[in-house]
Amino acid sequence: MPTELRPEEREALEGLRDGHAHSATVASEDAGHNESFFGRMRGRFRR
């Protein structure tokens, strides 16, 4: 996990920890794709 994050990245990761842990699994499987971060952001705001 990178230690230096932009505010929006940190916010997204905190959101994943708070209630979207299942999305983190999908993101880890999709690691290396640039769109994975934005996919997590969309998933966070979908509910």
Image (spheres, grey):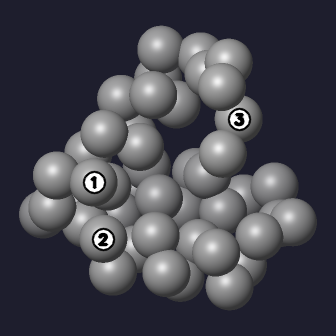
Give amino acid for label 1: Arg
Question: Which quarter of the rendered picture does the C terminus lie within?
Answer: bottom left
Residue highlighted by disc 3 = 2
Give amino acid for label 2: Ala
- The answer to whether residue 14 is above or below residue 29 is above
Asked whether disc 2 touches disc 1, contact meaning CB atoms under 8 Å apart, the reply is yes
Residue highlighted by disc 1 = 17
Give the CA separation, mark 2 to mark 1. 6 Å
Residue highlighted by disc 2 = 21
Asked whether disc 3 touches disc 1, contact meaning CB atoms under 8 Å apart, the reply is no
* Mark 2: secondary structure: helix
Give the class, few, some or many, for how many residues have Cα within 10 Å of label 3's Cα (few <14, many ≥20): few
* Mark 1: secondary structure: helix
Left or right of residue 32: residue 30: left
Quadrant hosting residue 33? bottom right
Give the CA separation, mark 3 to mark 1. 15 Å
Q: First in sequence: mark 3 or mark 2?
A: 3
Is residue 5 or residue 37 the one in the foreground?
5
* Mark 3: secondary structure: loop
Residue 43 visible, this orientation: yes
Q: Which is more foreground, mark 3 or mark 2?
A: 3
> Residue 21: percent from the left, percent from the top?
30, 71
